[in-house]
Image (spheres, rainbow, N blue to C red):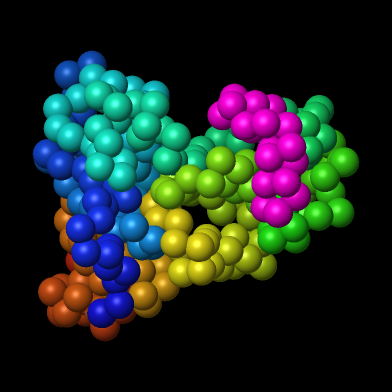
């Protein structure tokens, strides 16, 4: 098993404990708990409706009503929300770029929201888009870009303020195989090379790498949390796809 381990004494990048959440009295998340180490790569794997987006909405404080604890780098998102949110970059499931602005303008706007100076923002934007292969597109309006390019702009935007934790909610939905693979691999490089912890929500099992931490969420409950080999061993299966089938209701349908 090769799940990233935090340096001794370091707080996890993300810690969720005893989390319950309901919509209008209907329980959606039930006693959810897990943590992601500094620099770790965790896949939040769950079928449609498992509660992944709801969990992201709570981590990012779009929603607040809940029972339990959420800490980012040791900071409680409720008590120390500015400190917690400042350590976090987010790529939401629904695209949120302004299609009529250029790539550079979208990035500059986001950087300004984080209080970054124009100079720092420009340097950071140039670095991130270059790494994502978008260097030639800075002056293009987002409307002119492909779906995969737009997603990469959103990842660059989420990294501008150098977060320690990047959350991505089904970031490859609707993309072709090559674009998907490129984005999955880039996110892994961020974790392995830059030490950014990543929480990657998906229902696509082929996005799981053998070295990832996998958190299986089904009907609001964490059914498994560990390395791929551990989960396969615990379920007596040979692949993570088979383990997913054993652990989730979708697999019993
Ligand atoms: N605003 C809302 N009000 C009431 N119920 C909701 C609301 N948003 C989501 N739900 C319900 O909560 C459950 C979890 O939804 P959520 O979107 O968090 O799951 P998900 O794992 O992200 O699924 P998907 O992959 O389809 O986005 C579903 O049963 C959904 O119908």
Quadrant where the N terminus sits is: bottom left
Please state which of residues 100 and 190 is positioned toward the viewer in this rendering. Answer: 190
Please state which of residues 121 and 189 is positioned toward the viewer in this rendering. Answer: 121
| Residue 133 seen | yes
Residue at screen point 56% across, 53% down: 172
Residue 31: % across, % down: 12, 40
- Which residue is most to the top? 24
Q: How many marks?
A: 0
Magenta segment boundaries in residue numbering: 107-128
Residue at screen point 66% across, 67% down: 178
Residue 34: % across, % down: 20, 51
Residue at screen point 41% across, 68% down: 208
Q: Is residue 63 left or right of residue 157?
A: left
Q: In the rendered structure, does residue 187 fall within the stretch colored magenta?
A: no
Query: Does 2 sit above or below residue 103?
Result: below
Magenta part, dominant SS: helix
**Location of residue 68 (image quadrant):** top left
Residue 80: % across, % down: 30, 27
Quadrant where the C terminus sits is: bottom left
Q: In the rendered structure, does residue 125 fall within the stretch colored magenta?
A: yes
């Amino acid at each position: 098993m090769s799940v990233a381990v935090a340096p001794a004494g370091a707080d996890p990048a993300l810690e969720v404990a005893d989390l319950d959440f309901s919509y209008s009295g209907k329980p959606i998340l039930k006693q959810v708990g897990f943590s992601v180490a500094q620099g770790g790569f965790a896949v939040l794997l769950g079928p449609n409706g498992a509660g992944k987006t709801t969990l992201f909405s709570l981590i990012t404080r779009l929603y607040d009503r809940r029972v339990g604890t959420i800490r980012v780098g040791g900071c409680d998102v409720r008590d120390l929300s500015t400190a917690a949110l400042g350590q976090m970059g987010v790529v939401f499931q629904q695209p949120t770029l302004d299609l009529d602005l250029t790539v550079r303008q979208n990035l500059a706007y986001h950087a300004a929201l984080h209080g970054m100076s124009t100079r720092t923002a420009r340097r950071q934007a140039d670095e991130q888009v270059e790494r994502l292969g978008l260097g030639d597109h800075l002056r293009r309006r987002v409307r002119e870009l492909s779906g995969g390019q737009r997603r990469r702009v959103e990842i660059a935007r989420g990294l501008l303020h150098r977060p320690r934790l990047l959350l991505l909610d089904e970031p490859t939905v609707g993309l072709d195989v090559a674009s998907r693979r490129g984005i999955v691999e880039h996110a892994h490089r961020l974790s392995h090379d830059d030490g950014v912890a990543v929480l990657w929500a998906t229902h696509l099992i082929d996005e799981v790498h053998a070295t990832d931490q996998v958190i299986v969420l089904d009907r609001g409950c964490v059914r498994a949390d560990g390395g791929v080999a551990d989960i396969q061993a615990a379920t007596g299966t040979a692949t993570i796809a088979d383990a997913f089938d054993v652990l989730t209701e979708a697999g019993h349908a």
